[in-house]
Amino acid sequence: MEENLITKKELLELTGISYGSLYRWKRKNLIPDDWFIRRSTFTGQETFFSKDRIIDRVEQIQQLKDTMSLDEIAETFSPVLREVSLSASEAERIGVAPRTVLELYAGHSDNSGPYSYNELLEIYLLSRLLNSGELGRDEALSCVELARDNSALVADGGLKLIVVRKVGVAVSLLVEDTGRACFEKDAKKLFELPIVNCMSDLKQLLDRGE
Amino acid sequence: MDNKMDFSISGSGSLAPGDYGKVSTSGSTTIKGNITCTAVRTSGALRAEGDIICTGEIHSSGSTKVDGDVTAGKVEASGSFRIKGNYTGGGFETSGSSSVDGDFLKGSIESSGSVKIGGSVKADRIEVSGSFSVGKDCESEDFSSSGKLTIGGLLNAESVKIKVDRNCEVGEIGGERIEVGRSMYGGVLGFLRPMHSGFLKTNSIEGDSVYIEYTETKTVRGKNVYIGPGCTVDYLEYSDSCEISKEASVKDSVKI
């Protein structure tokens, strides 16, 4: 997915940020070191970013930086697992997922709460999948099972979830965040989401809900 | 002070692993494992075979060698000070020769001697005037150096000031304000002349305000850029303003 990479220069042009800000945010761990992808080009070494991920992050920082210090923002983004326990109604209240999704999750995994961080992450993922409008309930639930079966890898935050469909059958896969994947021509990519985005969104919901 | 035992030795001896108060040595001492303490003062030869966690200051004027990691409120060393592991803590102030083979994880560096970090550095402030070398990346809010400088990876700081009095080599430089030049002195007739004849060699410089002299680099990217005498730049990209000295060579330049 070469087309999804942008150079540092393009990022600055697109978002209007300066080199000073970019390097400052890197120092403060607002942008993780491994998001800076080094590739050789004809002009020498260049730094690239995965486009959607970096633009999302820059927009989040720009929104938060007027009200929070850089260290506080970094805290928000750090995908550190936390001790949480939320009932289904609390999860609904802080916006992890709407009631219908919570009921679906409860019915499927025979667990009506209280939910741990990992379970909340699964619920949030389920909600994002269903919200995309591209997947049926069973398909979304099988994605959640995939995430659960690989929870240790998922917890590192370095993976993204991709869902493709071909001739009516949906298949979900977890791949390295910065890795590339190619698909057959008639396979349609329905959904792509870096797990780390889910984690930082969930963390913000939890922080706000406290 | 809680009832931790102070330890003091002035001949040759060894210290068992454990939890201590103040540790002071003036002979040749070996610490036989990990210790925690509130302060260390050593003026002879000290060798620690494990980690040192010191809530206060480590003051060393002899030769200190630590096989493990060091965590300290502050380090002040004037002899030789070597850490084989990582360093975390407050100010790292040295005037002799010091080294950290692992990473410098937290603190500030102030040195007029030689400092060598094998891994990467994350500091608040770095002010070095002797010789400073970092194997990987070096991050600091403020960075200023005036001696010999070698950084293998990226030097990333809010403000970078490099006096190229000796030859310096840095992988890449990025930050808000970047200033590279030679130290000057007033000559007989009052003209300012450079005191030394060093150059900086680097692959790229990226900053909002870039002011460089005596620098050889492939690319410079910035908002406001000044390319001074003695510079060789293959490619320059700027967005607001740019001034190039007659004594500089810039192959290509683009305003974006």
Image (cartoon, rainbow, N blue to C red):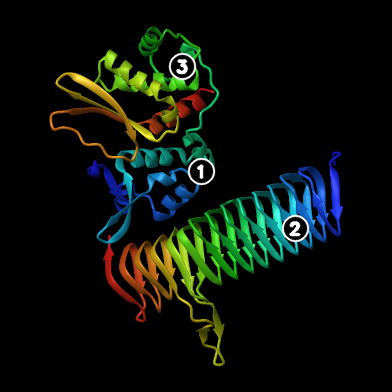
Q: Is residue B88 left or right of residue A94?
A: right
Residue B67 or residue B250, whichever sits in front: B67
Kind of residue sitting beneath label 2: Leu
Counting from the top left corner in percent of width and height, residue A54 is at 35, 42
Residue B16 picture quarter: top right
Question: Is residue A210 shown left or right of residue A196?
Answer: right
Asked if A27 appears above or below B94 in the picture, the reply is: above
Q: Are marks 1 and 3 on the same chain?
A: yes
Q: Quadrant of the N terminus of chain B?
A: top right
Which residue is rendered at x = 27% and y = 65% of the image? B254
Q: Which residue is mark 2?
A: B46
What's the CA distance linking mark 1 and mark 2?
A: 41 Å
Q: Residue type at mark 1: give it.
A: Leu
Q: Which residue is mark 1?
A: A70
Give yes or no for contact between labels 1 and 3 (Cβ–Cβ under 8 Å): no
What residue do we see at 36% from left, 81% from top? B247
Label 1 SS = helix
The image position of residue B18, as x and y in percent, is: 77, 42
Disc 3: host chain: A
Quadrant where the C terminus of chain B is found in the figure: bottom left
Chain letter for mark 1: A
Q: Residue at x 50, y 22 (%)?
A: A209
Asked whether the residues under the numbered discs 3 and 2 touch, taking CB atoms below 8 Å apart as contact, a structural biologist would say: no
Q: CA distance from mark 1 to mark 3?
A: 28 Å
Q: In the image, is B145 to the left or to the right of B64?
A: left
Residue A31: give its label: none
Residue at (13%, 29%) from the top-left corner?
Answer: A186
Determine the CA span between mark 3 and mark 2: 57 Å
Instruction: Work out whether mark 1 precedes mark 3 in sequence or the reverse, and give the earlier one.
Output: 1
Crowding at dot 3, Cα within 10 Å, few <14 / some 14-19 / many 20+, comes out as many
